[in-house]
Structures are given as structure tokens and as C-alpha cells.
Image: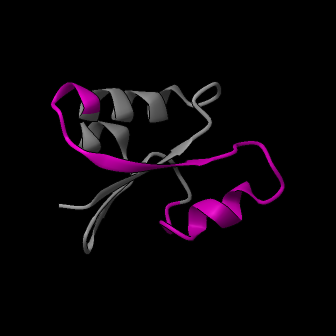
Amino acid sequence: MSLKLIVGSKNYSSWSMRAGVAMQHVGLPYEETVIALGQPDTHHHIARYSAAGLVPILIDGDHTIWDSFAII
């Protein structure tokens, strides 16, 4: 299993932090990528992973989930 969690800067995105905490709590191994929020290129970096333009994003193979409650 190769889960990837794309999150925003945790100082600004509690939603991103929630997804990571939930995954750690249940012991799921994952690779985390942090995207700096509030930068001119933030949307471009997020769009590389999801057309929704939101973080957090969980990628599991061909499946992409971009809502923190859905990830949890």
C-alpha cells in the first residue's frame, strides 16, 4: 500500500492536520507532501494532485480523496 497525503501548511490548515492525525492514530503508513499556502503558486501545486484545488488530498493508487472528513 502506498498512500500519499498532500497537505497544506499545518500552521494555516487545521483540516490538513486533522487528516494526518487520523491516519497516524490508526497506524496507516503514508508519505506526506506539504504545500505552502498563501503563495502565488499554491494553486498550481495543489492542482498537480487534484482538480478540486483543496487540501488535504489522499491518494491511494487510482483513487483521490480531497475532503478531510472523507479521508477520516
Residue 60 spot, x, y in % from top left: 25, 63
Residue 25 spot, x, y in % from top left: 22, 25
| Image quarter in which the C terminus is found | top left
Residue 2 spot, x, y in % from top left: 25, 61
| Image quarter in which the N terminus is found | bottom left
Say above or below: 43 vs 24: below
Residue 38 spot, x, y in % from top left: 77, 42
Magenta span contains residue 46: yes
Determine which quarter of the picture holds residue 71: top left
- The structure residue drawn at horizontal position 45% and vertical position 45%, both measured from the top left corner, is 56
Does 58 sit left or right of 9 as displayed?
left
- Residue furthest right in the image: 40
- The structure residue drawn at horizontal position 64% and vertical position 28%, both measured from the top left corner, is 12
- Residue furthest bottom in the image: 62
Determine which quarter of the picture holds residue 63: bottom left
Q: What span is in magenta?
A: 24-52
